[in-house]
Image: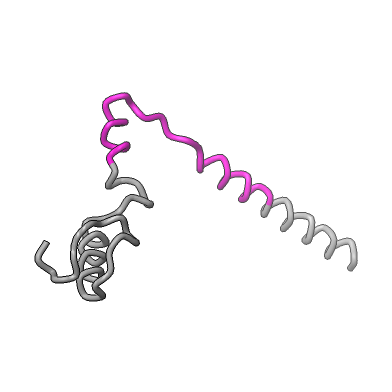
Amino acid sequence: MMKQFALRLAVKVAMGMLLAGGALASAGCATVRPEQRAILADPTMQFDAKSVDQAALEHTLENREGSTGGGSVRGGGCGCN
């Protein structure tokens, strides 16, 4: 009885390791052609790039609060810039 349990457990562990190895092998790196690198290097493709929406939101907030310089944007608090 214990031998059957141990055998089943060993089979499950082996199958899990095989599945994990297959997942790691299929998640390999991709080769990027030189003409594709310019597209992938575009600032909009970067996660930390400042989006247009974020810049507009910061501009509105600075005008409403009457404070500038914290976001490195110049202008007054009148909303005219």
* Coordinates of residue 24 in the picture (x, y in percent): 58, 44
In terms of image quadrants, where is residue 81? Answer: bottom left
Is residue 74 covered in magenta?
no
Instruction: Please provide percent x and percent y for residue 13.
Output: 74, 55
Would you say the magenta stretch is mainly helix, strand or loop? helix
Where's residue 46, x and y in %?
Answer: 35, 47
Q: Residue at x 27, y 47 (%)?
A: 44
**Image location of residue 61, percent across then percent down:** 25, 71
The residue most toward the right is 2
What's the coloring here? one colour
Of the pair 20 and 5, the residue shown nearer to us: 20
| In front of the other: 25 or 15 | 25
Q: Residue 79's quadrant in the figure?
A: bottom left
At 31% from the left and 24% from the top, the residue drawn is 34
Q: Nearer the viewer, residue 78 or 53?
A: 78
| 22 on left or right of 68 | right
Viewer-proximal residue among 34 and 48 = 48
Q: Image height check: is 45 above or below 31?
A: below
Residue occupying image coordinates x 9% and y 66%: 80
Q: Is residue 38 magenta?
A: yes
Q: How many marks?
A: 0
The stretch in magenta equals 17-42
Q: Quadrant of residue 78?
A: bottom left
Depicted 38 relative to depicted 49: above or below: above
What residue lies at 32% left-to-right and 36% top-to-bottom?
41
Residue positioned most to the top: 34
In the displayed structure image, the side of residue 80 where residue 27 appears, left or right: right
The quarter in which the N terminus is drawn is bottom right
User: In the orientation shown, which residue stands out farthest toward the bottom?
Assistant: 65
